[in-house]
Image (cartoon, rainbow, N blue to C red):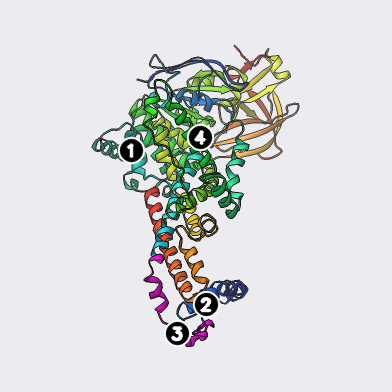
């Protein structure tokens, strides 16, 4: 066993660095979450510096737990993350299967498909909310206007006029409102992250055994059955990877929420923490700990689910 | 029933014609082996029969029904692939049941058939394992099991033994031969190994560059090869093919002699040479003899153990009745 000493010694700096890297922020957060710590308080200036004397126990946790907005933020986080995961995986598999054959212009199509992934999140959000989803100036507003004008024109048409006069005038949807801002975020992030899923599924599809498909053809399996019984199980692991990585990334969405609604719309957990940080560091830290627990639950739950349904 | 007929079948990949017009009949219940060097089109031919490749022109018939336009699944053929092509996410049971499940057969019937196939292939203990947990031979048996449950018109084997080690290969060869005796179903077997072809086939089809060089029973091919290529390809060790004076004297461009049809003497004979290597197999001894004026060495088979060693001078005389003669066009001269 003595010959293990040197390798362990050599590993030590890396291990210590990593521990330090992770443990310091985590333990600071834990510490702050158990004390009263605010940035600005004229009545109790002693709370403005982190000190063990301001010990509050689970008071911060209790405070956060009893806030309705905290539960709304959690609900919203889960809604946004699961919707994005669901959409990107389905779109990713569909697109990857679709372009997993040779056709003229394949190279260009692939580059175009990947390109949304290279847009910065903030830029992505600005483009979507202002140029596409804006109810007046965006593509949405223009399209709804156009449809309304066509219908208005058809009302006076001879035969079909009666039918179209029954149609209502369409209203463009405002995606900056409280309820709809989450949908806007889901749309723009799905657009941005579908390429990531496509990229991973595409490489996986290329390693699929063609002889298995030929065997299945001879065994009488049509295209759907080949997809269901061969391709989908083959994609099981990459789907798990995509789900896991995206779950981690999207639980911490911030830029899109900020740009879409500036806090007026549905918040998610990181945004909620961000608002608390403006003054109440203790409560923000407690929420942060809740977020860590939530992230772990989501990760475990999702991995189990994906693993079970696809790996048989 | 499983009589397979190919009529003027051709196949082009782009501009390259890999199979020029080709006619072939495989009778019902026959064990036909396609053999040839790699790239000779034998696998392509099998895939044309299976329907995995479309013929460029010509017709494929199974039991007198033209199936050229029929999709692979409707041709009633089962295929065993070189890589086994088992479905890695399914257990052995599900693998074997897959074609039946695709036919929407009732579950009780599927179970009965799978159990029967597993029993006949000694797979009963492995039914709940996944392919990844099986050895090469077992995987091959699963692939065969998946083929036999469908009770196809004919079995197609695409180099099924080339991924196995030598000992297993001999065993599986026997198992497949026995399976053929038991099922009496048409089998088409593709291999580049002429030993497999000789030992298993009722009918051997020798292919080169997409062209059928000769069709016949193993012994026909061995005893009367129709051209130089077949002569050199069939038989192990290879036939000695000699050009030059000795061949001209017999009125041929090339003369061929099997290693066992050459007499060795230490005193006198037609060719004088020196022993290069003597391989002692116990039952036989193969002498590789270098003869002046002949580029390749001549292989001679002697029964039992013969005491020759490197550098010995020997005289070789072919048995005249067993000399094969080939003309300038490579065809046999009788």
Q: Chain of mark 4?
A: A
In the image, is residue A249 above or below residue A102? below
User: In the image shown, does B82 or B166 lie closer to the viewer?
Assistant: B82
**What SS does tag 1 mark?**
helix
Q: Residues within 10 Å of mark 3 (few under 14, many from 20)?
A: some
- How far apart marks 3 and 4 lie (CA) works out to 62 Å
User: In the image shown, does A127 or B189 lie closer to the viewer?
Assistant: A127
Residue A28: which numbered mark, if any? Answer: 2
- How far apart marks 2 and 4 lie (CA) works out to 56 Å
**What SS does tag 4 mark?**
helix
In the image, is residue A91 above or below residue A151? below
Mark 4 and mark 1 residues within 8 Å of each other at the beta carbon: no
Q: Are marks 2 and 1 on the same chain?
A: no
- Tell which tag, 2 or 4, sits nearer the viewer: 4
Q: Chain of mark 3?
A: A
Q: Residues within 10 Å of mark 2 (few under 14, many from 20)?
A: few
Q: Chain of mark 1?
A: B
> Which stretch appears magenta?
A42-70
- Residue named by callout 3: A55
**What SS does tag 2 mark?**
helix
Residue B97: which numbered mark, if any? Answer: 1
- How far apart marks 4 and 1 lie (CA) works out to 56 Å
Quarter containing the N terminus of chain A: bottom right
Q: Where's residue A35, x and y in %?
A: 46, 81
Identity of the residue furthest to the right in this view:
B293
- Residue named by callout 4: A146
- How far apart marks 2 and 3 lie (CA) works out to 14 Å
Of the numbered discs 2 and 3, the one sitting upstream in the chain is: 2
């Amino acid at each position: 066993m003595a010959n293990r000493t040197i390798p362990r010694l050599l590993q030590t700096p890396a291990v210590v660095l990593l521990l330090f890297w992770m443990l310091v922020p985590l333990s600071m957060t834990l510490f702050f979450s158990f004390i009263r710590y605010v940035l600005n308080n004229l009545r109790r200036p002693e709370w403005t510096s982190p000190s063990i004397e301001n010990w509050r126990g689970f008071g911060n946790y209790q405070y956060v737990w009893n806030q309705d907005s905290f539960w709304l933020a959690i609900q919203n986080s889960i809604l946004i993350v699961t919707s994005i995961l669901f959409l990107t995986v389905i779109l990713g598999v569909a697109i990857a299967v679709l372009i997993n054959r040779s056709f003229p212009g394949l190279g260009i199509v692939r580059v175009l498909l990947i390109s949304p992934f290279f847009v910065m999140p903030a830029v992505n959000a600005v483009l979507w909310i202002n140029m596409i989803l804006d109810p007046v100036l965006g593509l949405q507003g223009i399209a709804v206007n156009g449809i309304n004008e066509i219908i208005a024109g058809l009302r006076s048409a001879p035969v079909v006029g009666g039918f179209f006069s029954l149609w209502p005038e369409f209203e463009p949807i405002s995606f900056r409102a409280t309820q709809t801002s989450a949908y806007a975020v889901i749309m723009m992030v799905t657009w941005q992250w579908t390429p990531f899923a496509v990229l991973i599924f595409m490489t996986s599809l290329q390693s699929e055994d063609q002889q298995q498909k030929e065997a299945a053809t001879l065994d009488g399996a049509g295209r759907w059955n080949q997809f269901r019984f061969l391709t989908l199980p083959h994609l099981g692991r990459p789907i798990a990877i995509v789900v896991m990585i995206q779950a981690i990334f999207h639980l911490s969405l911030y830029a899109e929420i900020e740009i879409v609604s500036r806090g007026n719309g549905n918040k998610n957990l990181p945004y909620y923490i961000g608002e608390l940080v403006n003054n109440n560091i203790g409560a923000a830290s407690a929420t942060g700990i809740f977020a860590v627990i939530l992230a772990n639950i989501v990760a475990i739950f999702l991995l189990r689910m994906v693993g079970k349904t696809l790996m048989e | 029933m499983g009589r397979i007929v190919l009529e003027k079948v051709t196949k082009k990949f782009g501009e390259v014609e890999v199979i020029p017009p080709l006619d072939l009949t495989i009778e019902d219940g026959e064990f036909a082996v396609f053999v040839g060097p790699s790239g000779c089109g034998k696998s392509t031919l099998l895939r044309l029969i299976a329907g995995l490749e479309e013929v460029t022109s010509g017709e494929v018939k199974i039991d007198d029904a033209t199936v050229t336009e029929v999709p692979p699944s409707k041709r009633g053929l089962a295929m065993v692939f070189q890589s086994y092509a088992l479905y890695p996410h399914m257990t052995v049971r599900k693998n074997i049941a897959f074609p039946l499940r695709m036919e929407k057969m009732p579950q009780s019937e599927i179970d009965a058939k799978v159990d029967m196939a597993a029993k006949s292939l000694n797979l009963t203990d492995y039914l709940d394992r996944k392919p990844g947990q099986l050895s090469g031979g077992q995987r091959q048996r699963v692939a065969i099991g998946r083929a036999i449950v469908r009770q196809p018109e004919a079995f197609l084997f695409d180099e099924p033994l080339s991924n196995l080690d030598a000992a297993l290969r001999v065993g599986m060869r026997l198992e497949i031969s026995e399976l053929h005796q038991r099922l009496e179903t048409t089998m088409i077997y593709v291999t580049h190994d002429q030993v497999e072809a000789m030992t298993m086939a009722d009918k051997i089809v020798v292919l080169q560059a997409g062209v059928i060089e000769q069709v016949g029973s193993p012994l026909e091919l061995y005893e009367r090869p129709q051209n130089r290529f077949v002569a050199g390809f069939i038989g192990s060790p290879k036939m000695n093919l000699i050009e030059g004076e000795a061949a001209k004297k017999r009125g041929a461009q090339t003369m061929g002699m099997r290693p066992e049809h050459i007499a060795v003497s230490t005193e006198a004979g037609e060719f004088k040479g020196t022993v290069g290597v003597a391989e002692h197999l116990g039952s036989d001894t193969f002498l590789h003899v270098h003869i002046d004026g002949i580029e390749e060495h001549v292989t001679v088979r002697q029964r039992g153990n013969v005491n020759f060693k490197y550098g010995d001078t020997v005289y070789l005389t072919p048995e005249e009745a067993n000399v094969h003669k080939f003309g300038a066009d490579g065809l046999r001269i009788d």
